Image (spheres, rainbow, N blue to C red):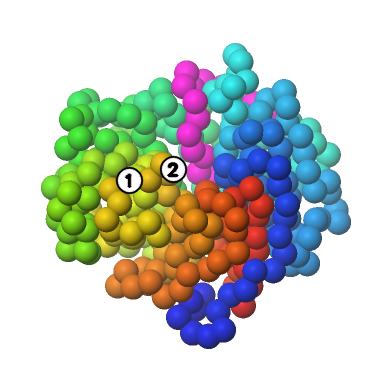
Amino acid sequence: MDFSSEPGPKMGYVLRGRAPATSISYHESGTHLFVASENDSVLRIVDCLNGGPPSDRSPMIKLQREGIRNIQSTHHGHCVLFSSGSQRGSKTNAVYYLSAHDNKILREFSGHTGVVTGISMSPVDDTFLTSSTDGTVRLWDIGKSGNNVGQMTSPQNVEGSPFASFDSTGLVYGISVAMAGGEGNHIHLYDARNFTVGPFSEMKVTRQEIEALLRKDGCTPESAYSLSLSEWISMEFNKSGKQILIGTKSGVAITIDGYDGVALRSFMLDSGHDKASSSEPLAACFTPDERSVLCGNENGTISCFDANTGILNRKLKGHVDRVGCVAANPKYTQIATSCTNTALWIW
């Protein structure tokens, strides 16, 4: 996906919503996009090839009883995983396997005692990871309702919630969690086929290392210190697994070397280096070709950075409010971005 050359991507189809999107997920075929919004408990579906509602299923599913917070596509074209909303009573912490074709919940996965903050699907089989505010990461099998097939607890002397993600091969997954006292973050890598023996790699990204990176990339000393304390809220591997993209609560994203844990590059919200924090978490993702990092901004724009140099190649304009979700189509030259409305951008 080339963001440096003219004319660049243009906004195509726009899906109108009534509440801010909280999660979006492309199907692996690139033909459909799933959009979740927690405030109105609605799942919407977009036909990415024709730019409109799908012809083979309902374009909107209301999930008022369960609520919906996070959405994750699966290998089945009509089925998705979603976690319940945060205001939905005794089953707030459940994950559901939904047939979007006929709006039927096929399986329920319960076990977390805190809100589920993330879902990551294995790219090679029917296992998936969930992370939660209860301090655990659990591994599940879509074909097996009920108990998880594996559980990873956070190491000692940590704080906050862990986050987990499979890499593109499905052979490795990573878990990140903050060290106690704001000293930095752990990243542990697991062999998905032999996770019971523990992580095969344990990396530490210190606060001082992040602060030094931010100062090198142009932050003032005061902003660099403040941003280095920012809570991590997401992690994503690039396709080769050589880099890990970290999203934070205070408007900065960071790439980490996937082998030795060195902080490589920072990417800032459009508010600029002089602002030490943002009122909302930063939405960020890699493009499939590994060349770019996309970041949603509070002013409704999307910053398109060179993943290796950190240079801002382009800024996309068109949203009317904060862009809280960004995703890149895994098969086609297309990206999706969401505020209350969701836009497909094409070249």
Q: CA distance from mark 1 to mark 2?
A: 9 Å
**Residue located 51% across and 20% down the image:** 111
- The answer to if 112 sits in the magenta stretch is yes
Q: Is residue 331 visible?
A: no
Q: Among all residues in the image, which is located at the extreme top?
A: 90
Q: Residue furthest bottom?
A: 6
Residue 233 position (above or below residue 181): below
Residue ID for mark 1: 277
Tag 2 residue: 280
In the figure, residue 153 lies in which quadrant?
top left
Is residue 163 shown in magenta?
no
- Amino acid type, label 1: Ser
Does dot 1 land on a helix, a strand or a loop?
Answer: loop
Label 2: state its secondary structure: loop
Q: Residue 34, image x and y in percent?
A: 67, 49
Q: Nearer the viewer, residue 191 or 266?
A: 266
Which residues are the magenta region? 106-121
Image spot of residue 76 (x, y percent)? 69, 49
User: What crowding class fits label 1: few (fewer than 14 Cα within 10 Å), some (14-19), or many (20 or more)?
Assistant: some
- Name the outermost residue toward the right: 55
